[in-house]
Image (cartoon, helix red, strand yellow):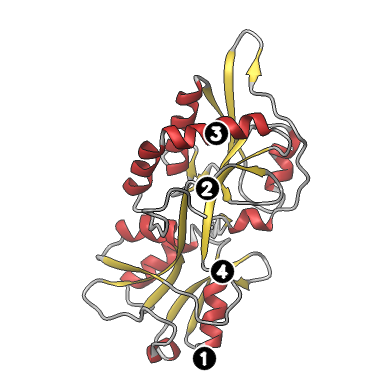
């Protein structure tokens, strides 16, 4: 929404940037080797995934594999343009653990959580929490920029509508380390007064910040078409409805375990209390 897949992914936004045609089937069984669940993931994209399997999507992948009685096998690929085509598109894996629900390049499961862009500020300070706050137009506000064309995320468009121009500081998704971490570091050092971040990244890096941080869901101003919330699902190759149905069953049966992982990684959620995030 990464800004990974949105990557965004903002977090899931990077996936939205990908262009690919995915074939309709992926191998899930190897003769004589038992069942294998192939997962394509970025080797260095915390809080989602990491080669040392410390991301929350690594944890969820382990739950899924256990429930299916399968061994877990990763195909590591940096999440850049063409990610879907180079991975699932060539049959190198069976599933993406986090994609926007309804993402057209793959067949998606039911959503298993929903999150939003959030405001982040230093605890003890009265940071802006609304685009109607007049401080939005004068305080230094950090916002993520997606892609090589430096396009703004939905909060960037909202800031422009609110009159925030010269006081906005852009952080490209592709740079020296995660943009979310750089933004939280800038908050801790008082380089900016407030940051607008994709929720899962905000929760993870704010919890690890040098100074305590506060987080609040950012609500899109009226009339802005760009969505602020996204439901996140798993993705399989189009046409592989059998695996999709199995994953849906796992999501229902292990929902409490998956919820616990998301809570451990401080993922801000807007779907709690709903049967199915939409």
| Residue 74 appears in the picture as rendered | no
Residue located beneath label 4 in the image: 227
Residue 128: % across, % down: 35, 81
**Is 165 placed left or right of 28 in the picture?**
left
Q: Earlier in the sequence, mark 4 or mark 3?
A: 4
Q: Which residue is mark 3?
A: 247
- Residue 181 sits above or below residue 122 on the image: above
Mark 2, residues whose alpha carbon is within 10 Å: few (<14), some, or many (≥20)? many
Q: Work out whether 14 lies above or below 84.
A: below
Judged from the image, the secondary structure of the residue bearing numbered disc 1 is: loop
Question: Mark 1 sits on what residue?
Answer: 163
What residue is rendered at 61% in x and 35% in y?
Answer: 244
Total number of numbered labels? 4
Please report whichever mark, 4 or 2, sits nearer to the chain's N-terminal start: 2
Q: Is residue 111 visible?
A: yes
Q: Nearer the viewer, residue 173 or 3?
A: 3
- Badge 1 crowding class, 10 Å Cα cut-off, few under 14, some 14 to 19, many 20 or more, is some
Q: Secondary structure at mark 3?
A: helix
SS label for mark 4: loop
């Amino acid at each position: 929404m990464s800004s990974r897949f949105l990557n965004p992914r903002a977090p899931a936004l990077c996936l939205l940037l990908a262009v690919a045609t995915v074939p309709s089937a992926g191998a899930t069984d190897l003769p004589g080797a038992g069942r294998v669940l192939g997962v394509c993931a970025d080797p260095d994209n915390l809080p989602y995934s990491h080669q040392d399997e410390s991301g929350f999507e690594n944890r969820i992948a382990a739950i899924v594999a256990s429930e299916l009685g399968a061994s877990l096998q990763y195909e590591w690929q940096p999440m850049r343009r063409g990610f879907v085509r180079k991975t699932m598109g060539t049959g190198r894996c069976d599933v993406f653990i986090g994609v926007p629900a309804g993402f057209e390049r793959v067949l998606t499961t039911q959503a298993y959580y929903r999150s939003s862009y959030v405001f982040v500020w230093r605890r003890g300070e009265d940071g802006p929490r609304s685009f109607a706050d007049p401080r939005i137009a004068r305080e230094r506000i950090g916002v993520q920029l997606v892609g090589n064309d430096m396009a703004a995320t939905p909060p960037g468009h909202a800031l422009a509508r609110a009159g925030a121009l010269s006081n906005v500081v852009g952080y490209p998704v592709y740079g020296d380390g995660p943009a979310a971490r750089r933004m939280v570091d800038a908050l801790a050092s008082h380089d900016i007064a407030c940051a607008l971040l994709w929720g899962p990244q905000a929760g993870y890096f704010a919890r690890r910040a040098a100074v305590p941080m506060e987080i609040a869901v950012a609500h899109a101003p009226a009339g802005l078409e760009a969505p602020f919330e996204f439901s996140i699902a798993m993705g399989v190759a189009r046409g592989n409805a059998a695996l999709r149905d199995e994953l849906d069953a796992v999501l229902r049966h292990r929902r409490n375990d998956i919820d616990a992982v998301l809570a451990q990684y401080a993922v801000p959620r807007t779907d709690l209390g709903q049967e199915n995030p939409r």
